[in-house]
Image (cartoon, helix red, strand yellow):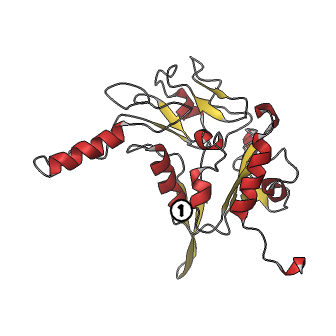
Amino acid sequence: MPDMLEPKDALVRMHEDMKRALAKAPRERRWVMVIDLRKCVGCHACTIACVAENKLPPGVVYRPVLEEEIGTYPHVTRRFLPRPCMQCENPPCTPVCPVHATYTNEEGVVVMDYDQCIGCRYCITACPYAARTFDFGETYTAGLPGGFPFLVGQAVADAFERTSPFEYGERRERVGEQSPIGNVRKCHFCLHRLAEGMLPACVTTCIGRATYFGDANDPDSLVSELIALPNVMLLKEELGTKPRVYYLV
C-alpha cells in the first residue's frame, strides 16, 4: 500500500525541487538553506566538502562549524552550529563597499566581483556573522621540503592549489597578486553547481541529512515545509538582516 512505502530521500526530493526552480526566471526563485541542528553531529564533512569544491586556501573558510560545550560537569555535551553566509535580504556588507564589489544578484545571493574588489575589507567588518574571509595568497604546499621526490609532489600539489575552481562562472589561477588573491571571499551557495542543476556541496555531503536547500517561493518544496515549522530560528534576527539560512532547533 502507498502509505507503507518508505519516505522519499531528502536529496531526491531536493533535486526534484531544483528542477522546478531552475525552470523559472532567476528573479522568481528564492534560494534558502535550512540546517537542522538536532541532526548535526559536528563531523565537519560540510566544511571539508566546501574546501574541496571551491579549492579554498589556508585561512579561507566558507562554511565553518562552530562548537560549544554546554551543561555542568560531569554532565556536559557539545552542540554544533554550521555557519555559512546568511545570504541576507538586507545585507549590511554590501552598502559599505566603496567600489560596489559585493552585491545581491538576481537570484538573491550575495556575491563578490573579484575584478572590482580592492581588498579594503570593510565588508568583513560589517558582516555580523563573520561570514567573510580574506585570501592572502597562502598555499598548503608552502614550506614543504625540496628535493626528489618531494619537489615533484610539491609541484603537482602547488599547481592544483594555484588553479581556482569554477567560481562565479569563471576559473581564476591564483598566481602572484592575481584575483582572488587580495580579495574577500565568501559562501555563494555554490552558484556554479546550481547552474548545472546540482545542490551545494555541503548539502550533498552532510552525513545526517541535516542541511536542506531549495526554492522558498515554491510552496511544494521541502524547504518551504521546513521554514513553516514552529521550531525555526534565525541568527541575530533582531538586526533586521533577514537571513536566508534557517535553523531547526
Badge 1 element: strand
Q: Amino acid at mark 1?
A: Glu
Q: State the image quarter where residue 228 is shown.
A: bottom right
> Can I make out residue 54 in this image?
yes
State the quadrant of the C terminus.
Answer: bottom right
Q: State the image quarter where residue 58 is shown.
A: top left
> Would residue 148 appear left or right of 240 to someone viewing this image?
left
How far from the left and from the top, in percent, is residue 125? 54, 33
Q: Is residue 57 above or below residue 213?
A: above
| Front one among 9 and 97 | 9
Identify the residue shown where x is 60% and y is 58%. Answer: 204
How far from the left and from the top, in percent, is residue 51? 46, 49
> Would residue 34 appear left or right of 119 to someone viewing this image?
right
Identify the residue shown where x is 74% and y is 48%. Answer: 18
State the quadrant of the N terminus.
Answer: bottom right
| Front one among 25 and 129 | 25
How far from the left and from the top, in percent, is residue 170? 51, 30
Q: Which residue is mark 1?
A: 67
How far from the left and from the top, in percent, is residue 208? 62, 69
> Can I make out residue 142 in this image?
no
